[in-house]
Image (cartoon, grey):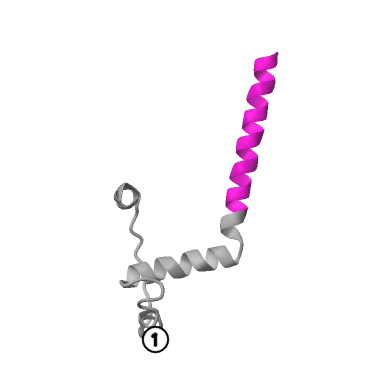
């Protein structure tokens, strides 16, 4: 429950426009990706990013960057 509260505090609204046909398609996903149109669009975007490996690539880059920073800090402390 705390996570949901923090997520709502840290979220940002982005306005997008869809054609009537796109809205009809989005509404067909009600119950699969969420209840509201915003939940459905968010779910579709996250699923697409995941499918294209963008999410795992970003996470891998952050992990590598964090490990590099830690190694550089340890090397600096040894000097």
**Secondary structure at numbered mark 1:** helix
Residue 71, position as x, y percentages in the image: 67, 28
Count of marks placed on residues: 1
23 over 3 or under it: above or below? below
Q: Is the magenta stretch mostly helix, strand or loop?
A: helix
The percent position of residue 35, horizontal first and vertical second, equals 31, 72
Q: Where is residue 25 in the image (x, y as percent from the top left)?
A: 41, 83
Q: Does 4 lie within the magenta span? A: no
Name the residue rendered at 46%, 70% in the picture.
Answer: 44
Which residue: 63% across, 24% down? 73
Above or below, 3 relative to 50: above
Residue under numbered circle 1: 21
Judge whether residue 54 can be spotted in this image: yes
Residue 36, image quadrant: bottom left
- Residue 70 within the segment the image draws in magenta: yes
- Residue 52 placement (x, y as % from top left): 60, 65
Residue drawn at 58 percent across, 67 percent down: 51
- On screen, residue 60 versus residue 11, left or right, reads right
Residue visible at 65% across and 41% down in the picture: 64
**The residue positioned farthest toward the front in the image shown:** 1
Q: Give the range drawn in magenta.
A: 57-79
Q: In the rendered view, does 32 fall on the left or right side of 2? A: right
Q: Is residue 7 above or below residue 76?
A: below
């Amino acid at each position: 429950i705390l996570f949901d509260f923090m997520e709502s505090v840290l979220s940002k609204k982005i306005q997008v426009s869809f054609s009537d046909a796109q809205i009809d398609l989005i509404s067909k996903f009600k119950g699969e990706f969420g209840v509201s149109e915003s939940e459905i669009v968010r779910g579709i975007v996250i699923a697409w990013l995941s499918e294209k490996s963008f999410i795992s690539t970003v996470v891998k880059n952050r992990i590598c960057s964090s490990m590099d920073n830690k190694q550089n800090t340890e090397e600096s402390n040894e000097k």
